[in-house]
Image (cartoon, rainbow, N blue to C red):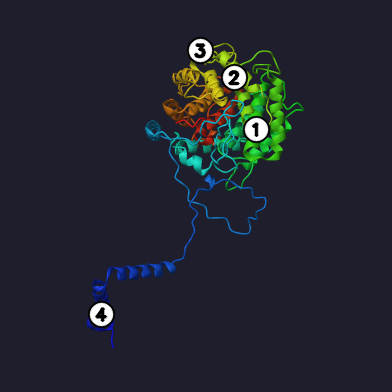
Amino acid sequence: MRSITDHRLEEGGFNESIQRLVSSSPWWMISLVVHAVAALILWNVPFSIKNIGDPRLLQAVNTDDQNPEEEPPPEEPPEEPEEDITEEVLEEDAEDIENEDDVDMDNEDTMGEDGLSDAPFTGPSDNSAIGLGGGAGGGRGGLGGRKRRRAKGGSGLTENAVELGLKWLADHQDVNGQGMWDCDEFSKHDPADDKCDGPGKALYDPGVTGLSILAFLGAGYTDRGTKRDNPYAKNVRMALRYLSTIQDEDGCFGPRNNQHFVYNHSIAALAMCEAWAMTRNPRYKKPAQDGLNFISTARNPYLAWRYGVRPGDNDTSVTGWMVMALKSGKFGGLDIDPDAFEGARAWIDKMTDPDFGVVGYLQPGGSPARPEGLQDKFPAEKSQSMTAVGILTRIFLGENPKESRMIKKGADQCLKIVPVWDTEDGSIDMYYWYYATLALYQVGGSTWKTWNKAMVPSIVKNQFPKGSGSRTGSWDPIGPWGPDGGRVYATATLVMCLEVYYRYDRVFGLK
C-alpha cells in the first residue's frame, strides 16, 4: 500500500509535493521538521574560537612556568585606524564630556579605625593601589577601566596620547646604563640629526625616574607580563632596580646633595610603594618600607615636612608628596608612622584660608612657590597648585568632598584657573594641572566635568604627534618647573593626567 507522500510525488514532483504536505500538516509537525533541518546543518559546520580582544587590554600573566613553544602564538588582530588629533575630534570629545550621564561608582564610604579612608582605589586591573599608581598585574590597563573611561571623561583620544607618551618615555630611558631616566641627557640615544631638546637638571634624576615609573604603573604596565601583553615590563623592572641601588642605609632614595632631595625621595618612595602594592614582588617590599621609614624620620614632630630631616619648618608641596607615599604604603600593608597623617592634616588646616579655601605654600592662603628668576614669567596668581594639593590631601585623609566646606571652596578656586595652553601668559603649570586633575576627579560632578573639558584639549593638542621625529609623544617642558624636570618631567606628568579615568575609583563613590 502506497503512502500519501508516494502518491503525491508521482503527481507533481518533489517540490510541489513538499508544499502540499506542509500546507496540510499541523503546526507542531512543521516546527519539528524545521528544527531537525537546522540541527543537521549546525552539526556539520565547524566551530572556531576567535580572538576578539585587543591583547593590550588583557591582564598580563607571569609566564615563568609556561612554555611559549608548545603552541603557536595567537593571530595578531588587525590594526585599528589611528585617530587624527584634530579640532573636530577634540570638539566632539568635549561635547561627550559635557553631555555624558553621571555614572554611579561602586565604592561605598569606608573609614578605617584611624579615621582615614580605606575605600579602595580600584585600578584598571581591579587593583586598589592608591596615589599615582594604577591597575595591577601588568598588561594594558584592564577591560573594566577601559570600558568606563568615556563615562568618566576619557576617550580613545586620551588613550592614544597616553600610549604615545609612554612610547616616548620608553625610548628615552637609559636602558644601556643604569635604567634611570636621565633628566639632562635623556636624548643621548637620539639620532645625531634629531636630538630632543628640553633638558632638566641632573640632580632630579631619581625624581623623574619615579615619575616615569608611576606613568607606566598608572597605565597598568608593571614589571611582569609577556612581551605581547606588556612591552614595558623590562623598562619598569630596570627603573625600579635603579631606585633600589641609589637608596642609602637610612632608606633615602638618591643623594642628599641639595635641599630639594626630599622631592626625589618622596616621588621615588611613592613609585616603590605602588610597585609593591600592585605586584607583591618581594624585591620591592624592603626598599618601600625603608623609604617610608625615612619619611617618618624626616617629619617635623607634630606637623609635616619640608627640606631635609626635621628642619623645623614645613611646606605644603613636600607634604603632599609624602602623604601620597604614606597612603600607598598603608594600603600595601607596610608600617607607617601612626601620627604622620594627623600632622599632615594639621598643616593643611593651618595653611587653608577659611573664607576662600585657598591653600598656601608657607603662609595661610598664600601663593605657590616659583623658581628664582621665573616669578614674572609664571605669575604665582595664575596657579592654585597648593590648593589642589590641599584638596587631594584632605580627601586621602578621609574628608568627604560632598560634605567638606573647605574642599568645596578650594575646588571653586581651581575652576577659576582651568588649563589653557597659552605660552605667552605664564599660566601653564603642569604641576598644578596634575594635582588638580587628581583632586577634582575625586570631587566629581560638574566640577570634574568643567575641569576635564578644559584639560583634555589643552594637553592632547599640544603633544607632539606621530611624525615629529624624536619628540613624538612628548610635550615641551613649559612652565615654572620645566627647566628643573625637563621633557621627561613634562611627559610623565601629563601622561598621568590622562590616565586619571581608570587609575582608581573615587574614594567616596561620588558621581
Picture residue at 52% right of the left edge, 55% below the top:
75
Mark closest to the chain's N terminus, 4 or 2: 4
- Which comes sooner in the sequence, label 2 or label 3? 2
Q: Tell me the kind of residue under disc 2.
A: Arg
| Front disc: 4 or 2 | 2
Which numbered mark, 3 or 4, is in the foreground of this view? 3
In what quadrant of the picture does the C terminus appear?
Answer: top left
- Residue 317 spot, x, y in % from top left: 59, 19
Q: Report the amino acid beneath label 4.
A: Gly
The Cα atoms of the two marked residues, 2 and 3, are separated by 15 Å
Can you identify the residue that label 2 sits on?
Answer: 345
Q: Establish if 5 lies above or below 276.
A: below
* Residue that badge 1 annotates: 273
> Gap between marks 1 and 4, in whole Å?
82 Å
Extreme-bottom residue of the structure: 1
Is disc 3 surrounded by few (<14), some (14 to 19) or many (20+) residues within 10 Å?
some
**Image side of residue 69 versus residue 419, left or right:** right
